[in-house]
Image: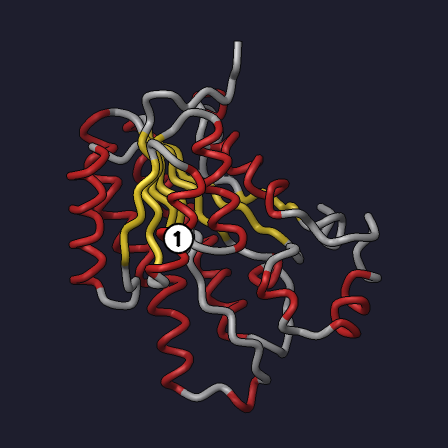
Amino acid sequence: MNILDLSGRTAMVTGAAHGLGAAIADALHTHGAQVALLDHDAPANRDTAAHLGSRAVAITADLADLDRLDNACAEAVQQLGPVDILVNNAAMAPMRGLWDIDPTEWDAVFAVNVRAAFFLTRTIAAGMRARGFGRIVNIASLSGQQARPTGAHYGVSKAALIAMTRSFASELAPDGVTVNAVAPGMIETPMVHTIGTDKKAELTAQIPVGRIAAPAEIAGLVAYLASDAAGFITGATYDINGGVLMR
């Protein structure tokens, strides 16, 4: 018996064209789900969906625009049916010092990382609640658990996402809908390459296991939380950071 069998389930993953989002879409699809991939990068999103093959559709979505996001949700449901699994993965992560963050960038980060996740969750959860089943997984971050002066707006937004996870979990628990967060540390994605080789080596040296995570390792945890096996887990935040934060 495959406890991670997601056959017959429909998943929606935001920020699915690249990196961790693509790995999560792949994991859910591999375990049998049909997957709606939402991303603003239409060409890359189509390529990722084509790589997955059948049971995967690419939907262009600007998460900062709530009207367009509603249209993307409607398109996903039209193509694949009601959503059983929602993964809020999309995020903006500009690494800027405290004194260099302007209001426009602050608002942009929160529009994608928090506001979009909140309203998308509320939209999708309404259907889950009515059907008596749902799995929602929010991709938070170690940055939302440890104070860092660089990328403060990103860290604060991820802390807000963790708090939001608990709020929705409490509201939806009686309806068969679980809501959990995953808080990764460094992941081997294109975003990591932007920090430079020396900085990457410096940060890697601070990780007790001596390496950064592969996207598939994070995606495997998400797939578990999306499965029937995780039905008694809700309101939790899972640390997956190689031992940087132990508690």
Residue named by callout 1: 164
Q: Position of residue 145 (x, y in %)?
A: 60, 59
Look at the picture and state if 8 lies above or below 168.
above
Look at the picture and state if 109 lies above or below 73.
below
Residue positioned most to the top: 1
Report whether 222 appears left or right of 71. right
User: Residue at point 50% right, 35% down?
Assistant: 27
The quarter holding residue 189 reads bottom right
Q: Which of these two is toward me, 163 or 143?
A: 143
Report whether 132 appears left or right of 98. left
User: Residue at point 51% right, 54% down?
Assistant: 140
Disc 1 residue crowd, few under 14, some 14–19, many 20+, Cα 10 Å: many
Disc 1 residue type? Met
Report whether 111 appears left or right of 230. left
The quarter holding residue 133 reads top left
Residue at disc 1, secondary structure: helix
Q: Position of residue 226 (x, y in %)?
A: 44, 31
User: Residue at point 29% right, 48% down?
Assistant: 121
Look at the picture and state if 161 lies above or below 94.
above
Q: Which of these two is toward me, 156 or 50?
A: 50
Q: Position of residue 53 (x, y in %)?
A: 39, 36
User: Residue at point 33% right, 60% down?
Assistant: 42
